[in-house]
Image (cartoon, rainbow, N blue to C red):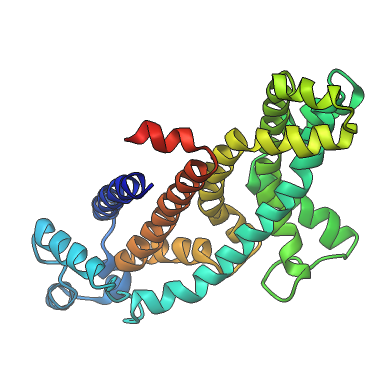
């Protein structure tokens, strides 16, 4: 296990460094000048040159990259070009809101996916199976930017059950969490169904049935428990996707998370904040997948043996 852990950590470090470099390059290759945005048309050439020098934007790109990577190792993401506030001070409060939304969306996804997948597998070919397939098709087909306004129209404007936008209590979390969790629930329900059907054909399931165990213990205690391995892999990958998908959902519902901060910073050409937000989302994805690999290896010892 220590060798497998070190190998995965070493791989995660290199991936994180590559992500940081890619984010830095993409941000600086995007058209637009933050100095032009900050000074507007009234700024003259001398003012623009002075501000560009003060912000370090007149340095060669490779030197800016070195300063960026060195700052990462010290936990310093720089300062906002717009507000001159430390980027970490801007990101951390927003990160809590994004994590709250992602965890709520994951909970809703599991609440929907587990019973739908279990019933679809237990009653294969029935109306439940057809309903589960239809739900999965709709869940992966409807984009967040369309589903979000539809839910607002129905449950906020027509019925008045939930707030339209903002982050004010538990009620304001429901609609964005449902919007973000529906696609994940659709994917997980089909994965649970297919994994369960594969597990239920194994010899140990026939043995459990021959011993006279109840259908509940056979399906839940033996079938669902052993079907979680492939589901866990998909869940880890999709949990990282939740953080990226939250960008659209947060802007639809005006949720004060990383997504809204990212869009605001892009509009202002605030390079350090955009870099920090994209990097934080990317590294969260890497971290979630690393934890998933380690948990997978913990559950299935064959993976650790294969890694040596």
Residue at horizontal 74%, vertical 23%?
Answer: 200
- Residue 28 or 168: which is nearer the viewer? 168
Residue that extends furthest to the front in the rendered view of this protein: 211
| 127 versus 192 height, above or below | above
**Is residue 242 found left or right of 47 in the rendered image?**
right
Residue 52 screen position, x and y as percent:
16, 72
Residue 224 screen position, x and y as percent:
73, 36
**Is residue 295 found left or right of 50 in the rendered image?**
right
Asked if residue 17 shows in the view, the reply is yes
| 41 versus 18 height, above or below | below
| 47 versus 59 height, above or below | below
Please give the count of numbered marks on the rendered protein: 0
- Residue 17 or 5: which is nearer the viewer? 5
Residue at horizontal 25%, vertical 66%?
Answer: 72
| 20 versus 100 height, above or below | above
- Residue 104 or 163: which is nearer the viewer? 104
Where residue 228 sits, quadrant-wise, is top right
- Residue 7 or 18: which is nearer the viewer? 7
Residue at horizontal 78%, vertical 20%?
Answer: 206
**Is residue 184 found left or right of 18 in the rendered image?**
right
Where residue 175 sits, quadrant-wise, is bottom right
**Is residue 13 found left or right of 304 in the rendered image?**
left
Residue 102 screen position, x and y as percent:
61, 58
Asked if residue 139 shows in the view, the reply is no
> Which corner quadrant holds the C terminus?
top left
Where residue 306 sits, quadrant-wise, is top left
Residue at horizontal 25%, vertical 52%?
Answer: 17
């Amino acid at each position: 296990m220590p060798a497998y852990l070190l190998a995965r950590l070493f791989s995660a470090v290199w991936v994180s460094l590559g992500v940081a470099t890619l984010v830095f390059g993409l941000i600086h290759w995007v058209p637009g000048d933050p100095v032009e945005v900050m000074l507007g048309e009234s700024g003259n050439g001398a003012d623009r040159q002075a501000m560009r020098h003060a912000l370090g934007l007149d340095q060669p790109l490779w030197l800016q990259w070195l300063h960026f990577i060195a700052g990462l190792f010290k936990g310093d993401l720089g300062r906002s070009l717009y507000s001159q506030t430390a980027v970490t001070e801007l990101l951390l409060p927003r990160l809590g809101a994004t994590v709250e939304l992602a965890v709520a969306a994951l909970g809703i996804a599991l609440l929907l996916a587990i019973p739908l997948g279990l019933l679809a597998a237990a009653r294969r070919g029935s109306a439940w199976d057809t309903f589960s397939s239809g739900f999965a098709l709709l869940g992966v087909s409807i984009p967040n930017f369309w589903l979000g306004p539809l839910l607002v129209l129905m449950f906020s404007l027509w019925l008045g059950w939930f707030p339209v936008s903002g982050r004010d209590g538990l009620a304001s979390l429901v609609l964005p969490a449902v919007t973000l969790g529906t696609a994940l629930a659709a994917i997980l329900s089909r994965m649970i169904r297919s994994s369960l059907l594969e597990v239920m054909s194994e010899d140990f399931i026939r043995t459990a049935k021959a011993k006279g165990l109840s259908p509940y213990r056979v399906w839940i205690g033996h079938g669902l428990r052993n079907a979680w391995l492939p589901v866990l892999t998909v869940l880890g990958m999709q949990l990282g996707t939740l953080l990226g998908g939250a960008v659209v959902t947060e802007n639809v519902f005006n949720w004060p998370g990383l997504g809204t901060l990212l869009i605001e910073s892009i509009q202002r050409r605030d390079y350090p904040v955009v870099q920090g937000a994209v990097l934080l989302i990317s590294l969260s994805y890497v971290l979630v997948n690393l934890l998933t690999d380690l948990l997978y290896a913990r559950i299935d010892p064959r993976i650790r043996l294969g890694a040596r």
